[in-house]
Amino acid sequence: MSAQIPFDLLNSLTLPGFERTLGELNLVKEISPGDGVDCKIAIELPVPGYPHKVKLEQSIKEKLATIDEPPAEVSITYSLNVKGPESGGTVGLRAKNVIAVGSGKGGVGKSTVAATLAYGLKSMGAKVGLLDADVYGPSIPHMLGATGKPEVREHLNPDGSVIQRIHPIQHDGLAVMSIGFLVPEDNAIIWRGPMLHKLLTQFISETEWGELDYLIVDMPPGTGDVALTLSQMMSLAGAIVVCTPQKVALLDAVKAIAMYQQVKIPILGMIENMTGDLFGRGGARQTASEKGIPFLGEISSDPTIRIQSDESSLGRIFEQESEVRNNLEEICTNVAMEIAREYLVKPQAPTLEILQ
Ligand code: ADP
């Protein structure tokens, strides 16, 4: 029977990709020595799709090999506990991270990126919601093939009072909300500031999203109204700006970045979409580096995306091996890592709890 392995042994290891130890992040949840040969280790990860698992396992095994009677057989299991600024904390939304997906202009693939981010993070084990806040052109329901009318149901408060809550549409394991579920597709609405504010308040604090690791918000292109409302309601994990590699799109993207910065939403990074022969490549990466913001990845131009969007089955992009699927998975990992690094490594502003 080998001796109990102390938590301190593994707590001193650095979590690859972060400058913090497993102990500092409280990630070692269990070490059970089994019957002398076996050692079971349970690790909690702060991000879905953690890209350095192999490296982490190697360093755990190397550390175990340094003790007097090293366990012959080691099994490591993982659980996921996504970290984030608890974005929805003060407005009745139980979402750890709210991510705005924006662009400088329409047609660059912002909604496509928002939807595929939601699918990708969900497929990596996270609980995800998708809010279509592109009220001027709500395309999410069609892209996903999500249909139905969100129901309003009565909920009982702890004090016995009754409130009405809107229930999002559940589709492919995602909670989805869009103005497109409420008005006919061809019905153009002119949104005045106060109406827009009211609608967003309903979508965020009167909607029963459940507990979410990520709420992905498909923002309207360009204008700052929705961004301002969101930033006044909550502390977002950050904004992602999508653009194509052409010069004009990049100039608009730079304006979008400035807009988010102005309303105090942190920039998580840029994504280049439709990279390829037609539009060129690399413009967004260069712009990101000039602006000193992370580059989160590129998505090749691929007709499958357009076809599956048109056919209302965008989620199927994750069902077959393809270059685009690899691009999207890499982006999801980069986004999750960027948020976790921001939250776990960089010095934090006072949390909402402290401010309350
Ligand atoms: P936006 O939200 O910026 O207006 P959309 O996400 O609606 O843009 O995309 C615009 C069009 O481009 C859609 O028809 C979509 O299917 C297509 N599209 C988006 N990304 C790609 C890509 N990487 N390859 C091919 N077509 C794409």
Image: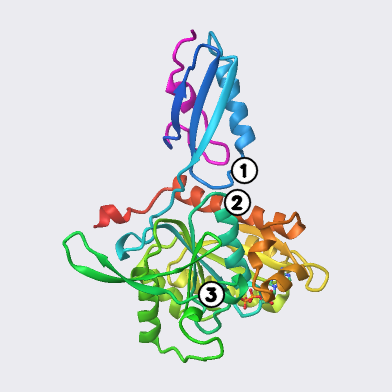
Residue identified by numbered label 1: 51
338 sits left or right of 349 in the view: right
The magenta segment is 1-24
Residue in view at x 83 percent, y 69 percent: 277
- The answer to which of marks 3 and 2 sits earlier in the sequence is 3
Asked if residue 293 can be seen in this view, the reply is no
Please name the amino acid that badge 2 sits on. Answer: Thr
Q: Report the Cα–Cα distance between label 3 and label 2.
A: 29 Å
Considering only vertical position in the picture, is 177 above or below 339? below
Q: Position of residue 74 (x, y in %)?
A: 57, 22
Task: Name the secondary structure under disc 1.
Answer: loop
Residue in view at x 59 percent, y 47 percent: 49
Of the residues tagged 3 and 1, which is closer to the observer?
A: 3
Residue 333's mark?
2
Q: Nearer the viewer, residue 78 or 18?
A: 78
Considering only vertical position in the picture, is 175 above or below 60? below
